[in-house]
Amino acid sequence: MEHKARPLNKKFWTPGVMVMLVFMAAGAVSIIARFTGGIGYVTNLSDARPWGLWVGVDVATGVALAAGGFTTAALAHIFGRHNYESITRPALLTAVLGYTFVVLGLLVDIGRSWAIWKPMFNWNTNSVLFEVAMCVMVYLTVLYIEFFPIVAEQFKDRVNLPGILSVFNNLVDSILKRGDAFVGKIMWIFIILGVVLSCMHQSSLGSLMLVAPTKLHPLWYTPMLPLLFLTSAFAVGYPMVVFETTLATSSFKLDGEMNILTPLTRITVFLLGMYMFLKIGDMIYRGTYIYLLQGTYQTNSFIVEVLFGVMVPWVLLLFKRIRQSRTGIFIAASMIIGGVILNRINVFIVGYKSPLSESGYFPAPGEIFVTLGLIATLMFIYRCVVTCLPVLQAPEEVSS
């Protein structure tokens, strides 16, 4: 049965939400400590280890896992597969929150957070990091514009501001209607722009590490790193949609949408297979497979990444029985997501080591609490948004 996207009338304050609040509070305390005591007060970073968990997870992984937004938009709107429209809104919301999460992580990580706006006016066109910064900034703006029609759909003709603000009801309603109409006419521009920008900065994140041939382990250092980052983002886009949709529909007791998710996994077989072919082929071509049996924590992490994050889920999705099983595709999607997370951690943390540094790195409790707090905040806002705005497909609920 087809259902319309609508706000969910579900109990909000569940035990899970209360757990989120605990992590959010711990993260808030750590962030306050970071800005009052300095970045060295809450981290194990040093001159030899200038970045750690916040860059490897909050930024690099956050960008990769938000890929479901542009891959779903491309599938539904550019390639004309309109039967996937029902998953574009939750994928868009995940992308909006994911990139907002990236920006918040950067604000905590960079030493001078108040100067984050400077790339807009001080252009260094020879810097890959400049290109990443500009693309992420513009793409986040594009995502908010793409999300505007969802807000307008919920509140136009229903604006009811409290107290003295009620005199602005007509003005706000007019802005919502005119803005919705205008954005609707040029939405195709933002969709195409979003896909292009995403492809640019997904690959550029890999380009960042090309300047560190003596610091990045040979298993990950390759001239193909930008292409591998891009293809891994393609590969994880639809599994992220499967993962998010399965969790949301299970949590809110909605239709599992297997008629949409099963075809997505068939596309994932091709995209993940392409990434696997490039990654393993590059390793064989460069001869770096000789490191696999060294037994170090770096080589072991690479084996886990490729075996359980790429090869095993790819084989699982070859079976029709797995693709038609809600549990099966969720497990496969979770493994792919875990593989991409581990890949970004491996490239930016595990595989990175300055040859002049003997000290290792492990995240301090403050770093861990900030990351967990930001993730909990993202999940909390997601629940707030789907409760208030028409994002998820749900049957109309009749008040008793």
Image: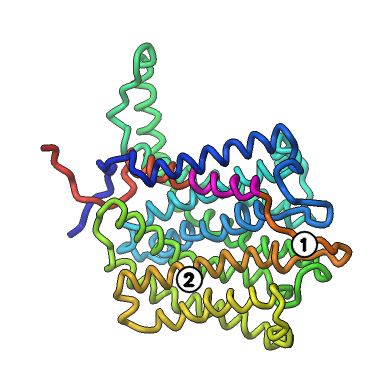
Q: Residue at position x 70%, y 62% from top?
A: 349
Q: Is residue 370 magenta?
A: yes
Q: Is residue 331 magenta?
A: no
How crowded pointer 2 is (Cα within 10 Å; few <14, some 14-19, many 20+) is rated as many
**Quadrant into which the C terminus falls:** top left
Q: Nearer the viewer, mark 1 or mark 2?
A: 1
The residue that mark 1 highlights is 360
The overriding secondary structure of the stretch rendered in magenta is helix
Specify the farthest residue to the top.
164
The residue that mark 2 highlights is 335
**Residue numbers of the magenta segment:** 365-376
Say which element carries label 1: loop
Q: Residue at position x 43%, y 52% from top?
A: 92
**Quadrant into which the N terminus falls:** bottom left
Q: How is the image coloured?
A: rainbow
Q: Amino acid at mark 1?
A: Gly
Compare residues 32 and 138 and report the one nearer the observer.
Answer: 32
Q: Position of residue 51 (x, y in %)?
A: 73, 54
Answer with left or right where residue 133 lies relative to residue 100: right
Disc 1 from disc 2: Cα separation: 27 Å
Say which element carries label 2: helix
Q: Residue at position x 28%, y 41% from top?
A: 11
Q: Amino acid at mark 2?
A: Met
Above or below, 132 against 165 in this view is: below
Answer with left or right where residue 17 lies relative to residue 365: left
Q: Position of residue 159 (x, y in %)?
A: 32, 26
Can the viewer see residue 124 in this picture?
Answer: yes
Specify the farthest residue to the front.
365
How crowded pointer 1 is (Cα within 10 Å; few <14, some 14-19, many 20+) is rated as few
